[in-house]
Image (cartoon, coloured by chain):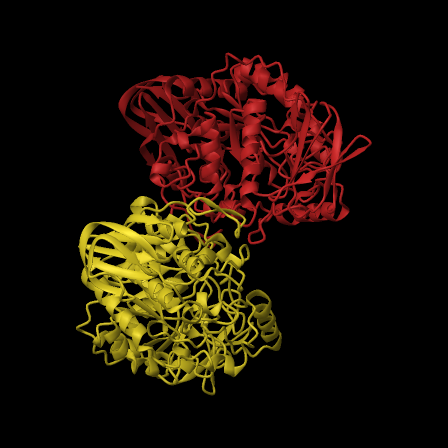
Chain colours: A red, B yellow
Amino acid sequence: MMFGPLIEEDGVNFSLWAPYCSRASLKLGQEIIPMDRDEMGYFRVKAEAKPGDKYKFVTDRGEIPDPASRFQPDGVHGYSQLVSPLFPWEDQEWKGLRKEDLIIYEIHVGTFTSEGTFEGVTHRLDYLSDLGITALEIMPVAQFPGKRGWGYDGVYLYAVQNSYGGPSGLKKLVNEAHKRNLGVILDVVYNHVGPEGNYMNAIGPYFSTKYKTPWGLTFNYDDYGSDEVRRFVLENLEYWMTEFHIDGFRLDAVHAIIDNSPKHILEEIADVVHRHGKLVIAESDLNDPRIVNPKERCGYGIDAQWVDDFHHSIHAYLTGERQGYYSDYGSLEDVVKAFRDVFVYDGRYSRFRGKTHGRPVDLDGCSFVVYIQNHDQVGNRGKGERLSTLLDRESLKMAAALYLLSPYIPMIFMGEEYGETTPFYYFSDFSDPELIKGVRDGRKRENGQEMDPQYEGTFSSSKLTWRIEDEILTLYKQLIKIRKEYLNCKRNTIIHRDDGWLIVRKDKVVIIYVFKPTTISANIDGKLLLSSPNSFPKELRGEINANKGFGIYII
Amino acid sequence: MMFGPLIEEDGVNFSLWAPYCSRASLKLGQEIIPMDRDEMGYFRVKAEAKPGDKYKFVTDRGEIPDPASRFQPDGVHGYSQLVSPLFPWEDQEWKGLRKEDLIIYEIHVGTFTSEGTFEGVTHRLDYLSDLGITALEIMPVAQFPGKRGWGYDGVYLYAVQNSYGGPSGLKKLVNEAHKRNLGVILDVVYNHVGPEGNYMNAIGPYFSTKYKTPWGLTFNYDDYGSDEVRRFVLENLEYWMTEFHIDGFRLDAVHAIIDNSPKHILEEIADVVHRHGKLVIAESDLNDPRIVNPKERCGYGIDAQWVDDFHHSIHAYLTGERQGYYSDYGSLEDVVKAFRDVFVYDGRYSRFRGKTHGRPVDLDGCSFVVYIQNHDQVGNRGKGERLSTLLDRESLKMAAALYLLSPYIPMIFMGEEYGETTPFYYFSDFSDPELIKGVRDGRKRENGQEMDPQYEGTFSSSKLTWRIEDEILTLYKQLIKIRKEYLNCKRNTIIHRDDGWLIVRKDKVVIIYVFKPTTISANIDGKLLLSSPNSFPKELRGEINANKGFGIYII
């Protein structure tokens, strides 16, 4: 590793890539130790130090924490701390994640439990194992400003958030998860860094001068100095995989990763992750098959990508909402297309985007992650409403069945499985007054969020209440069980669809979704496995008078 | 066509894409005729008018010329003029350009002849035909500010430069070229528009808000409204092909065309051009095989691309120059690599770029255009020196043989073929005082050009003198003849290279390049076809004591 301190028996190798600086020293306790600069702009020094010691770098561009700090116990502006890479791992039995088995559960550490820490999550692992999911997906843990935040404003890619329990907390969580046969996927942000606590921009060409994102500076992947920036990111992945036993990654907003190099950084990311036998999933709103296509089909070889089209189609159809991006969706036809072709916009004109969007994709369902809720789809609503407060009970259950039994990889948003109704807001804990005002105004203007993101109560009222609705939780467990027993992520076949209903067949399983009461003639015989409500006949044969709901049959 | 006026029997359909405007009218003579707006932001009106009539649009964002104007007789700020699409074409016998036959000749219309017009070029067509080239490549003719300029600051993609002779001048030139069996390639700029005379930015999302180029605003190919912008560019290509019988294009600086869409605009450009059976060549400094790879090999399918690595390797090796980007080149090994692998930087670290550059490419030579001079390589030198003033006579001749007999498509820079020695400077004719100062200072600072770009004498001293050096011209004709008779753009084989010499063999042709006097043992028998100097033996056999120069043998 080129980045970050390397702890050896006879001392610690400190390094700092700071090509804009002509001088740099290590500040360790009371000592100031000059560092040597090489021609690439790396400063290095070996010094006596041990885990727990705090340090900073003193450069001619100011005193700064280590951009590759392993821990920022006092936050983004404070000292960096040395962390021992050693950990008493007990996960030797863990076999790793297989894409085909993925049932993901997205959590935000700060609000998942009352503790708001990795340790709190650990206490819920038996519950999650019992639920039937196969992987936790943890929203970003790279050190962000303050104690409260979604994590997308992280500025220390290698430091685990102090308020969550730091690096040892995360290792313990992964260890406990693996012992329960649960994988851990980490959400990582390589498209931008947060606006507060970024000391990198002053010391080297870490960020692009050609491209920008709506959220701040974006990494320099293709210009002068980009080899080192790419290494900074690629080593970060290796760091999580080797030192934290992380099983996979969710790449935040890859549409905002602009790289005009012959080898796109996403392709390189996929290579590095696969070299370690791990998985990588992209959040992409490009509807571009290149992201997930294998290399031999001209793609980057990312294992899977999120499909907002699937979410939006179901959400707009079931809620009737048409505001913002939902204006592009709303018909059952769109739901059918999402089942059939993955992308609803695969070359169609999008009014919301004001342009033709997407390109057709042709891969099996294991390359796509779907959800009916996630942190964005809930939290970017001004009122942070969960689907449980937007839909009637039967529609909510149908939404669950639609995606959990879909040919795609399902992802549950924490609390959804038991019918949580508390909102999930956007919250932050910046310290810069101008930034605070900007975020507050921006959230109000763009998302209609009246709750002040900085207010502690906005955060605390987003915490799960754990008031479990047994009916919903039981249904989720049943659906997950059926998925595991009968289904996989090969493509479904839509047998039939008409105004207000849908029949999805896959191998021996036939699922009838009825959105409004109707009569359906079945040409196949089948036995009922599960239905909601209970009014579906036990035998699938001849005419069915169905109420709103769904019935799952084995034929 | 959606863009520009459409002349019909019963009137003219005027149209303007101006989604930022709520009102627009046609100003035709003394008349102001209101236009209808559709929901996409197109304003349209049909009015009585005829070729030669002048017009503007009056909008709530100001009075503007037509962004798709066919002619700006009074320059970038003046009225647009209607042009008849009819022309008495006489090129029915012309068979079109084949990539395999390309021998390109790059001209700048303003300095190619004393007239500085298309008509002036026409008078030299017999000379060019006699030289043996197969295609003229014309530096950009889209209307740019003033009377003097390289053309890369054009702002009216559809209007032919008034000072060159306007649209009818270009049509006459193409017609005369085709009659002489010469193709015409047009240099088109789709990565940015010039800083003066751009009225588009005020009326619609023509330009990206996410990306920027060093030269100004870049087109919006992937954001809100980008369908129309893409159409604006794609129709422009169709316009040149159908209304001007243009045979191919040279796309300026495609590395500055940033498009994050699933279908890159370059792929779409290739599709449109190929649908018309024409050719498209890219200027790319990415060393990215994706540009020229065919679709089935994950590329955009552009027919060929410029190879600066080939130029830089030969230039640095022969001149000994190491300033600027030449610092990355200089050894004979680089020349060999350019012959063997096309890209010298195909994944190697470039000190000048401060990053690893390029990716290996594996296509035959017909996908690459090479040169030992072009407008950039000569004109971006502060003193605008041509190779004829930088090299001794034998080296100059060797440079010519190296590229004209290479496995790649050769491109001659106007005047090079007869040993022109007059410089080719950067020149401009802006009217905005601040811009003039910026360009003047920038050229001095970045290129070391002391000659004021705005000074008329800088332009006029860049005009070819046509003081022909018979020895050089004769050599070019001989080399072209040999290329046509014996060689094509399949890959060459390097037989051997040692310190100071190089033997290139292809089929029956063996070329010996001697950079410093040496003794070479030949294992093959051959007969001398051409050499310079005359000291090469008539028969290739056994040991050859060779002076600096080259010998071409048939074996």
Residue B12 position (above or below residue A276): below
Q: Residue at x 56, y 68 (%)?
A: B448
Could one spot residue B356 in this view of the protein? Answer: yes
Most extreme residue toward the right is: A30
Residue A5 position (above or below residue B257): above
On the image, the x and y values in percent for residue B26 come to 46, 78
Q: Nearer the viewer, residue B9 or A175?
A: A175
Q: Residue at x 46, y 50 (%)?
A: B260
Taking the image as shown, residue B514 lies to the left or right of residue A278, namely left
On the image, the x and y values in percent for residue B183 come to 26, 70
Q: Nearer the viewer, residue A74 or A367?
A: A74
Q: Nearer the viewer, residue A240 or A446?
A: A240
On the image, the x and y values in percent for residue A367 come to 41, 32
Q: Residue at x 36, y 81 (%)?
A: B466
Residue A195 position (above or below residue A534): below
Q: Quadrant of residue B188?
A: bottom left
Taking the image as shown, residue B220 lies to the left or right of residue B473, namely right
On the image, the x and y values in percent for residue B339 come to 33, 52
Residue B456 position (above or below residue B440): below
How many numbered tags mark residues here? 0
Could one spot residue A317 in this view of the protein? Answer: no
Name the quadrant of the C terminus of chain B: bottom left
Name the quadrant of the N terminus of chain B: bottom left
